[in-house]
Amino acid sequence: MADSFNYISFGNWEKVDGNVDVVTMLRGRMFEYTPSDMEKRLENLDVDATAFLETLPTFLCSEIQPAGNAVSMLIKYGWISNITSGRKEVSMTFETQIDFGEVTFDDMETAGSVFGADKFQLYRTHWAVREGDAQEVLSRLANCKPDLADLIASHEATAVIGAAILPPPRDKKVLGVADSVESFLQLLYDSPVKPSTETFFRGHGDVTYELTPSLLRKWDNGDWQFMPSEDRLCKELLIAHHDEFQGDQYCFDRLVRMQHYGLPTRLLDISGNPLVALFFACSSKPKTDGEVIVFHVASSGLKYYDSDTVSCLSNLSNLTYAQKNEVDLSLDLDTFNETDVVGKLLHHIKSEKGFFEGRIIPDDLGSIVCVKAKQTNTRIKSQSGAFLLFGQEATLPDAGQDGIEISRVTIREKERILAQLDRININTTTVYPSIDQTAVHLRDQYQSQPSRVASSSAPEDAPER
């Protein structure tokens, strides 16, 4: 496991200035800009996860701000302990080892190079577990604060290295391994029946793939791939192909169409048909283990395309990244709805629902909901499609969440399974019922194989056998 350190950042400088004994962070801001595998190991904040976090050196920082022609931030270095996790917040004790005070950098790039961070991270309230050597960070900070160089050198010489504690394993519930259609279906039949639920499925060609919408995916180092550009992505596609979206009544309808055409959105496709999910698990990376994920969704929590909650979550796509950063889900209902950014969100919601009451429940805005969409295209119909819609700062744990229970089936012998599925008419033509996909499937199905060339050593008049 690579060396790591905690990087905790606050937009409110008062949370970092002066004597700091207790630090509190919103659960929704936990592990942003953290490598995905590490995030999944820690997201439950159980005893093993908190024990690991408490062994890591910690930098407590303010968000960066202009300082004349330069930029500056408050920085403290120390250790955390007594991590306590609540439903909305996480609190911990912070022990300061070195207080750097306000550190000034020539520019944003110089500040970022100290921590290996980009401008989004330096301007973002969050808690990241970053890969890297904290001692190297301290050495770079010593160049910025020469008056603290001796203290930093002394700390490096006397630093106590705690017992080696690894992050906990991921909490995946695996039903078993399937190498045929029959064994796959048997595993599903053998799993316990969940009353008052509806079951959905999703296929991954690689067991390492995450249950994350394309918009919320990260690079290996934890940086966002698309999230900061969500509003621009949606607007640019609408500008370029406005006529395509004329019939869409709600923002959710537009997101479904955008997802259909491949734009990164906060939607995750799921299917009511397990064999369709099995097809997707087998249709790529033939030599790599695939996976079918099984979702048991509480019937009471299912939403439809015209739900008010769905409108609230979908219209987050209309907010800029800076506006999303202003959303504070820890506020009480009244205070939350009086903030400027919620007013902007309400403006977008009321543009599609003029009757919408001007009150948004913070917990709803940070949720993940299962939505049944309109059957607006043949692909949704053929795949028995539904969607998981991800709200503000929402992540889906490996084991699921309240109202969404998750289990998995590991898939092997993909080529064999694809042949079996084709015999029952589950193939590219039926899963992707468009003329171009049908043409490709027919081409592959009816392509003649090259005839065998006779051996050059056989006489030309050798009798046929």
Image: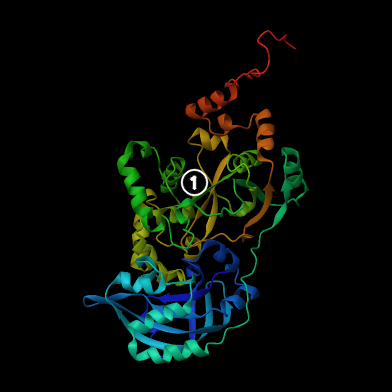
Q: In front here: 456 or 142?
A: 456
Residue at image point 37% right, 71% down: 113
Q: In front here: 231 or 404?
A: 231
Is the C terminus in the top left, top right, bottom left or bottom right quadrant? top right
Q: Give residue 4's position: percent from left, percent from top.
A: 52, 73
Q: Give residue 331's position: percent from left, percent from top.
A: 44, 72
Residue at image point 62% right, 52% down: 207
Q: Give residue 458's position: percent from left, percent from top.
A: 68, 15
| Other-residue count near label 1 (Cα within 10 Å), few / some / many at <14 / 14–19 / ≥20 | some
Label 1 sits on residue: 305
Residue at image point 33% right, 38% down: 241
Q: Secondary structure at mark 1?
A: loop
Residue at image point 61% right, 59% down: 398
Quadrant assignment, res 319: bottom left
Q: Is residue 47 above or below residue 440?
A: below
Q: Please indicate whether residue 422 sits to the left or right of residue 371 in the image.
A: right
Is the N terminus in the top left, top right, bottom left or bottom right quadrant? bottom right
Q: Give residue 395's position: percent from left, percent from top.
A: 53, 61
